[in-house]
Amino acid sequence: MNMKKTYKLFVPGCLMLVLLFGSCNDWLEVEPEDGVIKENYWTTKEEVYASLIGCYSAMIQDGMPEKMFLWGELRGETVMPTTSVPSSYQNIIDGDIISSNSITSWSLFYKVINQCNTLIKYAPEAQASDESFTDAMLAQYQAEAVAIRSLMYFYLVRTFRDVPFIIEAVVSDDQDLQIKKTDGSVVLDSVIYDLEAAALNMSSRFGEDPAVNKGRFTTYGVYSLLADIYLWQEDYAGCIRNCDKVINSGQVSLLYADGSNLIETETNNALTGLLDTVYYLVEGEANNFYNLMYFEGNCDESIFELQRESDFPNDDFYYLFSFAYLAPRTDVIKEMFFIPSEVDNSWYDMRTEGVSYKGSYIWKYIGTAREGAATSYMRTLATMTCNTIIYRLADVMLMKAEALVQQAKPLESDSAALASGEVETLLSEAWDIVKQIRLRSNATEMTDLCNGITDASNLTVTTMEQFVYEERVRECMFEGKRWFDALRHAKRDDYAGNNIHYLNDIALYSASAAKVANLQTKLKNKDFHYLPINQSEIEANKALVQNPFYE
Amino acid sequence: MKRYTLIVLCLITGFMGLNTQLLLAQQKVAIRGRVYATLDNQPLPMAHVYEVDKDGRILSTAVTDLEGHYSMLVKSTGNKLSCKYIGYKTTAVLIGTRTVIDIPMNEEAIELGEAVVTGKKQVQAGMMNIAERDLTSSMVRLDTKEIAELSAASIDDAIQGRMAGVDIVATSGDPGAGMSIRIRGTTSINASSDPLIVVDGIILETSVGDFDFANASEEEYSQLLNIPTNDIAEIAVLKDAAATAIYGSKAANGVLQITTKRGNIGPPSVSYSFQGTIGHQPASIPTLSGDQYTTLIIESFLNAGIQMNMISNPEFAYDTNNPYYYYNYGQNTNWIDEITQTGYIQDHSLSIAGGTSKVRYRFSAGYRDETGTTIGTSFTRLNTRMNIDYDVSEKLRFSADVSFTHSDNNRNYLSSIRTRSYTKMPNQSVYEFSETGILTDNYFTPQTNQQGTYSETSSESSRNYNPVALAYNGQYRILSEKIIPKLTINYRITPTWRYALDVSFDVGNDKHKSFLPQTATGLDWTNINVNRSMESDSEGFTTQTYNKLFWTPRLGDKHNLMVLMGANTTSSNYESYASNTTSSASSVLQDPFSGTVSGNSTIGFSSGMSQYRSSAIFGQVQYSLLDRYILNATIRRDGSSKFGENYRFGNFPSVSGRWRISGEPFMRGLSGWLTDLSIRSSWGINGNEPKDNYLQYSNYGTYSYTYLGTTGTYTKNLQLSNLRWEKSTQAQIAGNLIMFDGRINIDYDYYYKSTNDLLFDDLVIPASSGFSTVNYMNVGKMDNIGWELNVMTTPVRTKDWTVNFNFNVARSQNFIRELSEFISTESGDWNENGEYLTRYIMNQPLGSFYGYRYKGVYLNEEQTIALDAEGNQIYTYDENNNYVPLYMKFGAGTSVDYQFEAGDAMYEDINHDGNINEQDIVYLGDANPKFFGGFGPSINWKRRWSLSTHFNFRYGNDVVNSTKMSMESMYNYNNQSTAVLRRFRHSYETTEEIANAPSDLLPRALYGTGYNWLGSDRFVEDGSFLRFRSITLKYTFDPIILKPLHISALSMYFTAQNLYVWTNYTGQDPEVSITALGLGYDAGYAPRKKDYIVGMTVNF
């Protein structure tokens, strides 16, 4: 064996291997070619804008419209399960709520939240490298992200009460993902603080295109959200302050609010035999109302609605309403909310059959026109482009009315306030709002709780509270508000008095006959008013404690 | 770019050695002479004379004439002349200054009888060739001659049950279906447990791309189909860490090493073989006729308290006044028979092989055409392979292997079509009757009937479609091309140093095409799933290089040393494109081009791209002392682009040794009969890497839709900075015993494998982070313990008779040792019909499942009263203070709260509280087999007749008979098996009636309510089986008869496969693969068919 020769080969051989391997680290650094990674993102304002659009897109991803609808409506009495309803829906309706129910999953909401957090954190990096990215623009984008995040937390708190409150972007597995719950009220206080600050940086409009003005958060969207949260937090002054900013802005108006396009006529009252003045709808105007508000969307009244284009039809709503997992509970609706007029049966509320529902369909989403047979004017999956309305003026006006009544409530027992007419002023202002809403919809006298009252001094807080509450059902039917409205009324002043009846009344109609008693018993426990945290979340996050009723 | 530069450099340096010599060509000199035999001085005509340089490289040649004369121009007088002639020893003479050179040839002495065979058979163990008797690691080999007569499209099917410790299970009996291969058990909790496949030293890419298309068929396409069994010379399984350590980070699940056939020195030999197969589906489970079915459905409604409305359910009315429904729903259709056909396979393969001392070649081509037993399934394959070895000189050898495979696999659009056919309404007609009762050619496919509507989003079992229309009009087709060129350069630098370079390219294209016809779903034309078609293309391109340096010094007789050093790089690129369209005008227009793309996020176009790189350096030493003490050590350092900086590199060492006791001086006395007795032991570490790329980055993606006309971006994944290899450490002790000149050959291995940093994919993490799952996480530790026994015997070996008997058995157990607390340890709902609980329990195997104990049927109301532990009825006071019996309930106190009635299924009330709930759930079984293996005797008579058989078995595994569950539940509109004719139909009141009640009574039919089919031991069965896998009778013709026909060899055979299964299992086929959570579900897919094969092989 020639050792010399061996070494001659061995040493360079080894050297070559070492060199090869030394350069390997770079060679093994492979970055995706069909996407971009965080390190290469956040360089221009366009990227930040795309990321902001991503936050909005996340709000319409598959599953979001369904969850937003179900959390707000499923436990209400105006929707009814059909025979094809999934058992997860039926169990919530009947109060058989367990943590493995998929409806209790909040993952999509937190996905939106994390996108907002990521934008808020990294957008300044982009500004540093893009000179055309102004401070105002950055503040605007961040404010919109804050608004979206706040809306998500508002949904979460209303549904679960206490939730993990995360405002830091989660990027890597180095971070602690085991986050404890924060008290819901603390979350909302913090959200209010953020929103008040964000409102200062928001735009009030983005140009001429109504889709953009309604499809992105504007100052009015933020004020509406603030009003809603203040109302939930029982800060009525805050609510009214924000409602007024919207109502008095001059940027939004009720569709046909003046009632001038109603046909006035006199008709014989079937009961009294006297002549009554009746206002008939101009049919075409009602059709137009449906068309502008619900079929086309982004009407003058709208403040913030999630946009849908034909490139991404609303699958969720298609399956919900076309395959009819859920149908309108027409018996309850007709007996309680849209009672036909006794004066003249052909005089009707515009918001009834054809607008809110039609036959066994929830028509606000699935229809293409107010008139005609349901089967011929229904959207197909390809044309399922109905927007999801989050806030519109009528909603905000009724929030204000509710806040006014609640402001009057403690004063009713205060003789000084009564004497000074303070209570009357508040109630009459609320009444005016309700009247305005009712007039444009041509509401019938059968649903007018103040029917016959001519003088505002005869109004009582109890009547007005009920009146506003019922008017909200009529106005915002199937717009994802019903259960939250009822819960807000029930929990008010820490479930004072008999407030719980708001929920019990619903239970009477919503649950299957066999389950009503059981559900009403469960509703006595206020912990049951919130959903359990989903089982898989409890298992994945050891810092979480299951919500009290479901432990 | 760097990669290519490297390859080119290597190639150039390789050629340099050649070129320098060519450039130095000298003045040519003419030489002539005569070749003659020394014995009789006769001339030798047609003898070859070569000019050979000192490296043995041939520079010029000449052939002698009839007188034995030759003449030629030689390039250098320093070279040698070499002459070859058959029957004579090759002679070489130095040219020197002579110009006339006569070459005397000596006859070759034929002394075969005296020759002592001392050569050791070398086998390829990883990257080194090591004598089989010196192996320190565990490796089982199988010569494909043993399986040549089987009809198997891919090798895994053929080797099932033939190698100890290799558990192979078919996922389906349909053509082209993949198989699940587990070497030494399941080692990963839900990352891949598939072994690494190495073909001629090169890792086979088993997946084209890592993209997840919305495929209708979820079964994996078996990449092993790309290597036809006829091209395989030998298959070896490397099991322990010492054997696989050389493959480092990818080899934790074992290695399947395939060696293809190559040419040998000799005249061209042409071989043709043919196989024809007829396959029959075994008898199906008998189902109810249409009339029996209708009776059952109406009864199940009545039992549930519903009077069926015949106006709204005309399907069950049999109303002659409504002829459309009367005819269309008045049939007795056997849907299974309607979709079943006889399967045929024809397989042709042709090969030409041969070679000289310089060049050896083998060329093969094959064609296989397979028709499945389910209508609409088939598999066609065309393949060629060319393996060439060219010895340029004694020092330099080039090898080039090129293989090409084209395959076309047709499947049903839904793989569950057979399951659906079992449960499809039998009173429904296959073809539509008109309003007047005249049978038409159209499929009868209502959009909706009691069995529901077709919806892509719902589970396959609840979709309603016409299985016959789906089988004929629907398709799921996989077209695949695979080209693998491989170039090897071997250069012997010095007698002890050798350098080898392998460069291999792997080009794979897969096209998936699917079509869901409207004729099968009956959907409304506006529906998204009407005539929906999908086409996807994925292309993979992989380059692998291996630089290897071998050193085999001569250290005398006592020592034997072999050293290997090397480096390896892998680079893969994948690209894919998919289009989904819908609503083409007709079910005949199946191309995506005919459809439209709007309407849904799942419709449209998508594409992807991905890249992967890895590199490694490795070294291996094999040392033996006195032929008795053998040691092997391996180390490999791997780097992979799949990991972040913190965990990019990993080291994978192994050590193994062998002590040949039989070689010790004190054992000499036994050498008469003891050929070899050795003890082997090894220890080593292997890795397993995740499937996905780019996980170490926070990747941004775009939404597939726009918002306000802009496409938004989002973060796709959580950045995984801490992801690392799954590391498995394996130790084993093993022994080899060979006796009586190899007539008894026993291997025994015992191993302990511990897998750390278990990879878990799609792990659920707190959704509050914004990500609901993380692609991969290292979550725990699992152990595998087991043993393998392989016995090969030749009990009879006489002049005329040879009898062989081989037997192998293995046991593999896994235990979960540690698990991250973030893994959900339990799955399944206790209060849902049909669900079993599965749990991960520390120190218990993966694959245990839990449920209720089924005790039969409540025969009357009396029996539904709860019993206490002593068997006395429990009485209690109700709210009105009445003393009343406590009736058995299910889930009392929960939302379920169901009171059992006569005719309901009875479950054991373990805690005697009168309430069946999760506390009554007990352990029911384990999906892991206790033992598995195979055996087979073969007999050979006078080398003319041979009879070989093979059996394989699994013992002690429990299977959930899902088919039975869904066909005896009587809970919905599904058709049921004829077993339900024994259902409870009336209460058994008197003692006599009770005594005479049938023992196999089934619970009552109960539509949509009750708990008659909870996950209980009623559907858990012992999945043990012994399968008569194959029997072959083969006749080889006498070469003397064949000689006039110019045929050198001819054999014909008859084989029968899957003739019989001995089992207590009542379902179709107990051979089921284990799902991710470790449950074995038999869902009634096409079971193994019975095949009858005739074949012949002819050599020219």
Image (spheres, grey):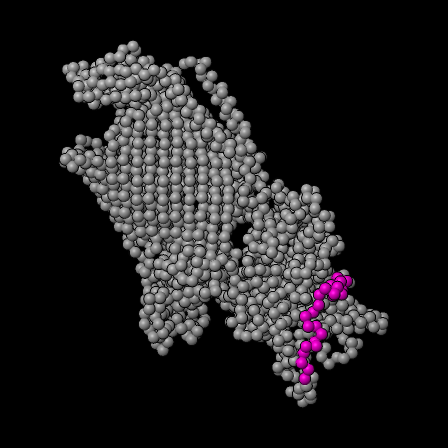
Residue B89: image location, x then y, percent: 23, 18
Q: Is residue B743 shown above or below B311?
A: above
Q: How many marks?
A: 0
Is B728 on the left-hand or right-hand side of B122? right
Residue at image x 20%, y 23%? B46
For residue B665, say whether it is visible: no
Q: Is residue B1083 above or below residue B756?
A: below
Q: Residue at x 44, y 52 (%)?
A: B535
Residue range (magenta): A240-265
At a point 31% along the width and 28% down the height, the residue shown is B359
**Can the viewer see residue A156?**
yes
Residue occupying the point 16% across, 34% down: B1043
**A90 to B814, vertically: above or below:** below
Q: Nearer the viewer, residue B417 or A388?
A: A388
B386 or A28: nearer the viewer: B386
Q: Position of residue B538 (x, y in %)?
A: 45, 46
Q: Is residue B182 left or right of residue B722?
A: left
Q: Residue furthest top?
A: B97
For the residue pair A263 and A145, the one nearer the viewer reads as A263
Residue B82, position as x, y percentages in the image: 27, 18
Residue A241 is covered by the magenta coloring: yes
Q: Is residue B958 above or below residue A270?
A: above
Quarter of the figure that contains the C terminus of chain B? top left
Instruction: Indicate left or right for B1040 with B773 as reference.
Output: left
Q: Nearer the viewer, residue B64 or B1090?
A: B64
Instruction: Assess whether residue B354 is covered by the magenta stretch.
Output: no
Image coordinates of residue B966 in percent, x first then y, are 40, 59
